[in-house]
Each structure stands twice: as structure tokens, then as C-alpha cells.
Image (cartoon, rainbow, N blue to C red):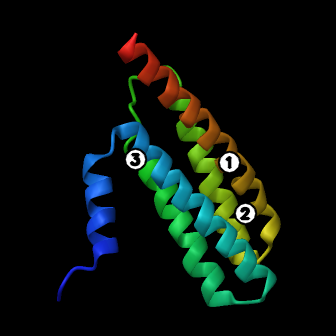
């Protein structure tokens, strides 16, 4: 199978990304899948809701696995990620979009925070 130019571009982008960029890319994916899961629930698409909400859970679990446990905020972030997954499970089981919408709001805030942190880190390394 010949790799498509899009796949090759994505592969190169991921391989050359900084840890901060990867975190933001994962967050973008979680946000996209969360929105798709909410949309699927609202359209009564049980399979689509399950598939997308499980993808969000997998990304959130990856955040927890790759968390720097020596960081002063690690314990609080871990609790937050556990809460996210509990709410996503609730949304998926009950097919209720509200818990997923709550998580989506938090993911959007986290992305903004990580983007600011990445800018601060970049400025500090060039300063």
C-alpha cells in the first residue's frame, strides 16, 4: 500500500512535534471526538456515541499515563482526568450529552492553558 501524502505529512508532523505540541494535538483530538460523541448522542446514534466517547476516554487516559508525577500539579491533574473519564462513562452509559458537554468545556480550558504554557516555555527558552 502506498502511503498517502496526507498520512506522510501527519506522520512527519507527529514525529517532529515538541511534547507541548503533542499534548495540544491530543487535546484537539479529544475535543473533536467529544463533540462528535455529543452530536451522536443527540442524534440517537448509539454506536457513534460509544465509539467517539471511548476515543476521548483513551486520550484522557493517555494524559494520565504520561503525566510527570514529580510535577506539583500532577496529583490534581490526575484527579481531574479520573473525573473526566467518570463523566464520559456516565454520558456513554446514560446516552446523556450533559456530562460530555461538561468535559468538553474543561478540555477547551485545558487546551488554552497548555497553549499558554507552551508559549511561556518557548519564550523562556529563547530569552
Cβ atoms at labels 1 and 2 below 8 Å apart: no
Residue 42 circle label: none
- Left or right of 35, for residue 1: left
Where is mark 1, residue-wise?
Answer: 108
Give me the residue at 69% from left, 59% from top: 87
Q: Are marks 2 and 3 in contact (CB under 8 Å)?
A: no
Please state the horizontal and vertical placement of residue 36, each as a whole percent of the image.
Answer: 66, 74
Q: Nearer the viewer, residue 53 or 86?
A: 53
Q: Is residue 76 above or below residue 97?
A: above
Residue 64 seen from this side: no
Q: Which mark is residue 22?
A: 3
Please rate how many residues cluster around mark 1, counting C-alpha atoms within 10 Å: few if below 14, some from 14 to 19, many from 20.
some
Circle 3 residues within 10 Å: few <14, some 14–19, many ≥20 = some
Provide residue 92's location: percent of width, then percent of height.
68, 74
Splitting the image into 4 quarters, where does residue 9 fall?
Answer: bottom left
Rendered position, 43 above or below 116? below
The percent coordinates of residue 119 (x first, y second) are 51, 27
Up the image or down, 52 lies above or below 88; here it is: below
Mark 1 → mark 3, Cα distance in angstroms: 16 Å
Secondary structure of the residue carrying numbered label 2: helix
Q: Label 2: how many residues lie within 10 Å, few (<14), some (14-19) or many (20+)?
A: many
Q: Position of residue 98 (x, y in %)?
A: 82, 64
Q: Secondary structure at mark 1?
A: helix
Query: Exactly how many numbered labels are in the figure?
Result: 3
> The N terminus is located in which quarter?
bottom left
Tell me, yes or no, if residue 34 can be seen here. yes
Cα distance between the residues tagged 2 and 3 = 23 Å
List the residue tagged with mark 2.
100
Q: Residue at x 33, y 39 (%)?
A: 18
Amino acid at each position: 500500500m502506498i502511503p498517502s501524502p496526507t498520512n506522510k505529512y501527519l506522520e512527519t508532523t507527529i514525529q517532529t512535534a515538541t511534547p507541548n505540541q503533542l499534548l495540544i494535538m491530543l487535546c484537539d483530538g479529544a475535543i473533536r471526538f467529544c463533540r462528535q460523541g455529543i452530536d451522536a448522542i443527540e442524534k440517537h446514534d448509539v454506536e457513534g456515541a460509544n465509539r467517539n466517547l471511548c476515543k476521548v476516554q483513551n486520550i484522557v487516559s493517555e494524559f494520565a499515563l504520561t503525566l510527570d508525577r514529580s510535577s506539583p500539579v500532577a496529583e490534581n491533574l490526575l484527579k481531574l482526568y479520573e473525573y473526566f473519564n467518570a463523566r464520559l462513562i456516565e454520558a456513554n452509559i446514560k446516552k446523556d450529552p450533559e456530562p460530555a458537554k461538561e468535559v468538553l468545556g474543561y478540555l477547551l480550558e485545558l487546551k488554552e492553558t497548555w497553549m499558554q504554557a507552551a508559549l511561556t516555555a518557548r519564550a523562556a527558552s529563547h530569552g
